[in-house]
């Protein structure tokens, strides 16, 4: 680990460079993705189409610019997702100087695992939870006085928020790992705080999912398993434990 701390101005300059590279990657990939914006939109709303099949619900564009801006948001979402490996690489490169040499070599596994976790969460939500959400929302079309005709921008907004929420939720092991490896929270505290973490996970799952126990459990259980996984990984790389082992070996 580097002993001489760099000035705060150097850290800010480095952070600015990393953020610029992330934004550049998002911008370039968003521009490329705009050519496929319609296909991206149709993919995202497929669970909505399947849930609304036979109900007469259709998607509408109620303003002249709604279609264009919705497709633009689709391209931005795709650019963000596709640039995740670059984002994770830049994050790791920013914090790497404060890590042990053995921990710095974990950059490629970190980038791969972080990207894989996000996509796994997004795909899990898309295939397992989205149909439950939109089946639930479509069920309110029983009144003869109400006809549901959702706008494409509103449907995209709901779908993209869920897509990002599930992808972000599955990054929990990475968050736990960083809390431990940076010394903000010890592995011992993470283990002792497991009951509170479980409660928080179920609260978050209840917020992200419709008010039915099945969808809440479908999100909460994987998140809890990922939390335990993150605690296990953080124990392996726990800097406090490593320092203690090094000190003991030097004393011997």
Image (cartoon, helix red, strand yellow):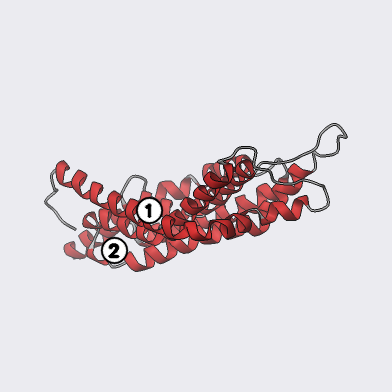
Q: Considering only vertical position in the picture, is 202 above or below 88?
A: above
In this rendering, position of residue 246 left or right of residue 25:
left
Label 2: few (<14), some (14–19) or many (≥20) C-alpha neighbours in 10 Å: some
- Residue 153, located in which quarter of the rendered image? top right
Residue positioned 29% across, 63% down in the render: 103
Earlier sequence position, callout 1 versus callout 2: 1
**Image quarter in which the C terminus is found:** bottom left
In this rendering, position of residue 44 left or right of residue 134:
left
* Residue 129 on image: x %, y %: 67, 53
Q: Residue furthest right?
A: 144
The foreground one among 229 and 206 is 206
The foreground one among 172 and 59 is 59
| Alpha carbon distance from label 1 to label 2 | 31 Å
Residue positioned 39% across, 62% down in the render: 85
- Asked whether residue 229 is in view, the answer is no
Q: How many marks?
A: 2
Q: Considering only vertical position in the picture, is 114 above or below 58?
A: below
Q: Circle 1 sits on which residue?
A: 27
**Which labelled disc corresponds to residue 112?**
none
Residue positioned 38% across, 63% down in the render: 111
Q: Residue furthest front?
A: 64
- Residue 232, located in which quarter of the rendered image? bottom left
In this rendering, position of residue 223 left or right of residue 28:
right
**Image quarter in which the N terminus is found:** bottom left
For the residue labelled by badge 1, is the local secondary structure a helix, a strand or a loop?
A: helix
- Asked whether residue 5 is in view, the answer is yes
* Residue 20 on image: x %, y %: 28, 50
The foreground one among 250 and 109 is 109
* Residue 58 on image: x %, y %: 74, 46
Q: Circle 2 sits on which residue?
A: 103
Residue positioned 44% across, 61% down in the render: 115
């Amino acid at each position: 680990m580097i002993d001489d701390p760099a000035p705060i101005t150097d850290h800010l300059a480095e952070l600015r460079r990393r953020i610029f590279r992330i934004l550049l990657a998002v911008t370039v990939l968003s521009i490329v993705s705009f050519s496929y914006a319609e296909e991206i939109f149709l993919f995202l709303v497929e669970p909505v189409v399947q849930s609304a099949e036979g109900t007469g619900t259709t998607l509408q564009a109620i303003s002249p610019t709604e279609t264009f801006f919705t497709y633009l948001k689709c391209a931005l979402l795709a650019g963000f997702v596709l640039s995740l490996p670059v984002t994770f690489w830049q994050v790791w490169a920013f914090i790497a100087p404060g890590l042990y040499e053995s921990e710095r070599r974990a950059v490629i596994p970190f980038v791969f695992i972080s990207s894989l976790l996000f996509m796994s969460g997004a795909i899990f939500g898309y295939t397992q939870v989205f149909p439950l959400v939109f089946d639930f929302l479509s069920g309110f079309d029983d009144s003869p006085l109400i006809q549901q005709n959702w706008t494409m921008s509103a449907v995209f907004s709901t779908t993209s928020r869920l897509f990002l929420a599930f992808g972000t939720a599955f990054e929990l092991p990475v968050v736990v790992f960083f809390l431990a490896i940076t010394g903000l929270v010890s592995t011992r505290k993470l283990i002792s705080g497991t009951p509170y973490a479980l409660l928080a996970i179920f609260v978050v799952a209840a917020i992200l999912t419709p008010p039915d126990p099945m969808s809440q459990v479908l999100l909460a259980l994987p998140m809890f398993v990922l939390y335990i996984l993150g605690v296990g990984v953080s124990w392996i790389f726990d800097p406090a434990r490593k320092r203690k082992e090094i000190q003991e070996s030097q004393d011997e």
